[in-house]
Structures are given as C-alpha cells and as structure tokens.
Image (cartoon, grey):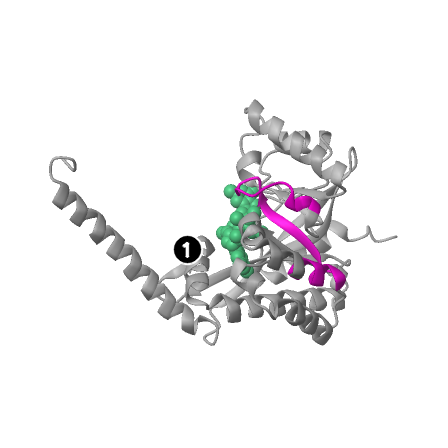
Amino acid sequence: RAKKDGRNAYRFFTSEMQAQSARALMLENALRRALERRQLSLHYQPQFSLDPDGEARIVGAEALLRWQHPELGWVSPAEFIPVAEASGLILPIGEWVLREAVSQLRRWDDAGLPGLSMAVNLSAVQFRHADLPQLVERVLSEIGVPAERLELELTEGAAMDDPAVAITVMNELHARGVLLSIDDFGTGYSSLSYLKKFRVGKLKIDQSFVRDLTDDAEDRAIVDAVIRMAAALGLQTLAEGVETEGQLAFLRRHGCQAVQGYLFSRPLPAEAFAEFVLARTAPISAY
Ligand code: C2E
Ligand code: MG
Ligand code: MG
Ligand code: MG
C-alpha cells in the first residue's frame, strides 16, 4: 500500500517523525529542570575481577544515570542521553554525574568499604569540551579522591570523532592518572590502530558479543580474539552483560580479567550497593 500511494506513505513517515521530535522536545524541556528538581540519581553496578580459578572479587562500580520524572516515570538513559547530547544539557548533567560518582566513592571509603574504582560514562560532547581534563582534576582534588580510582568510559565513536583532539585529551587525562576505557568495544566503526596511538587502558567487551556466547561460535571467536589482542597490547578487559554461569565460565577460561552483569547484580542505589559489597567482603567474625 505504501508503494501504491507514495504521498500517504510520505505523510505517514513525517507524522511519525513529528511525533518523535515532539517527544524529544518535551523530554528536552523536562530534562532542563531535572537537575534542580533532583530527579536525577545514580545507580551503581558492581564490577568483579576474575582469577583463572579463584573467586570473582568486587573491585569497582560503574555509575549509571537514572531519571525519574513525576509524570513520565523512569526514562531510559538510552532515550534521554541522546536528547541531553543534542541540546548541550549533557555538559551540566555530565559534570553533576562526575561529582556525584566521585563523592559517592569518597562516602564509601569513609564508611569503610574496600578501595573500589569508580567508572563514569562520558559522552562525546563532554570529551570534546576543552575544559574536561581540568574539570576532572578539580573534582578529584575538591572531593579528595586519587585519580587512580577514577575510570572514564568512552565509546569508540567518541574517541574517533576527532583523533587529534582525542589524543590530546587522553594524554592529559592519562597524565593525571585517570584510566580510560573503551565502552561497547567492537560495536563502533573505528580503526584498531587507535589502540596503539591512544592512552586507552581497558576494553569493555560489548554485551552484544556476550549474550549468545554459549551458542554462537562467531561470538566466541570474537570475544576470544579481543581478549588475546588486549593482553598482547597490555590492555585490561572487562566483559559487560554477563547473565549466565556459562558465559562466565567461558570468559574466565579465556582469560577475561573482569566482568559485570545481572548474574552478579543489577545496577543498585548507593545504599544497596554498599550493603551488597559489605555482605560479600565482611570477614567472618572471630569467636
Ligand atoms: P553502558 O555504559 O554500556 O552501560 C551498560 C548498560 O547495560 C546499562 O544500561 C546497564 O544497566 C546494562 N546492563 C548491565 N548488566 C546487564 C546485563 O547483564 N544484561 C543486560 N541486558 N543489560 C545489562 P543503562 O543503565 O540503561 O544505560 C544505557 C547506556 O546509557 C549506557 O550504556 C551508557 O552508554 C549510557 N549512560 C548511562 N549513564 C550515563 C551517564 O552518566 N553519562 C553518559 N554519557 N551516558 C550514560
Ligand atoms: Mg559504560
Ligand atoms: Mg557498554
Ligand atoms: Mg552502551
């Protein structure tokens, strides 16, 4: 029908597109007030290191942004992050995320949690913003957390957007002691040569390769190759989206160094995260 009646088809698609951009505009307006109205929060997903045969040990957290709007309910970051990026709102929001995540790490330290690392997602827009290395340094020193405890996650697209800028920014962050990781590794279109040129310290293997690991030989080959390549280049590896024991066993056997995923825990509010960590690390009381 669409082929026979081109004009209607055109109108159909434009009205769908109009509805989408109306929603984006509505979200943008709501997001503009979200920070001051305290609708944003962070959840934290535990990250575990894997020994070839030992236990998985909790070593860090990834901060994930959450937005709860009084009428819209929980809006997914997959929907509102692009709106925040397109409108420039990601700059104040991203700064809030960085401050909040680093402050939370400090509060956990003060509460006696073992020294974890904190991974914060960065948007390409933040990465390109001239002030980023200074902002990161300022936040860390104001809150009193060493740079070595902070990890910044970038996607391949963000890193490759403008390689010359990327090299400078990465060098500046690296010089300050911050670890850079490539998020969703393997899903972008970038050249692998950046791994050599850029100050990347860790690859986060995208969950799309992990999902079917136990039945898909191609995914197994890809994940195995990424782990080997990373090891040869001296990069750390973390697999995302680990949901089953089978996936975990494969990753451990093939030398993946760290994992996160629903098998261990969903992202948790700060207090629940602390309880989760303490329950797993509390020494058996001696009596
Ligand atoms: P990401 O950084 O790759 O984060 C991983 C996503 O996978 C998170 O979704 C997490 O909740 C989800 N996840 C974790 N374990 C599992 C699992 O075992 N199975 C499945 N199916 N999913 C799992 P979330 O929180 O909805 O975030 C989506 C994306 O939004 C993030 O992907 C990141 O790109 C972006 N994002 C989230 N927070 C921020 C932020 O503060 N700043 C920026 N710039 N982007 C953010
Ligand atoms: Mg991430
Ligand atoms: Mg990811
Ligand atoms: Mg992602």
Quadrant of the frame with the N terminus: top left
**Dividing the picture into quarters, in which one does residue 214 lie?**
top right
- Residue 207: where, in percent of width, then height? 55, 40
Q: Nearer the viewer, residue 115 or 88?
A: 88
Residue 211 appears in the rendering: yes
Q: Is residue 134 left or right of residue 176?
A: left
Residue at point 69% right, 64% down? 105
In the rendered image, residue 173 lying in the magenta stretch gets the answer yes
Residue at point 79% right, 36% down? 54
**Which residue ends up furthest to the front in the rendered image?**
164
Magenta residues span 169-196
- Residue 183: where, in percent of width, then height? 59, 48
Q: Is residue 21 above or below residue 191?
A: below
In the rendered image, residue 113 lying in the magenta stretch gets the answer no
Dot 1 amino acid type: Glu
Query: What SS does tag 1 mark?
Result: helix
Q: Residues within 10 Å of mark 1 (few under 14, many from 20)?
A: few
Residue 267 appears in the rendering: no
Q: Is residue 262 left or right of residue 141?
A: left
Residue at point 36% right, 62% down? 72
Q: Nearer the viewer, residue 55 or 286?
A: 55
Q: Is residue 158 above or below residue 129?
A: above
- Residue 116: where, in percent of width, then height? 73, 57
Residue that mark 1 sits on: 79
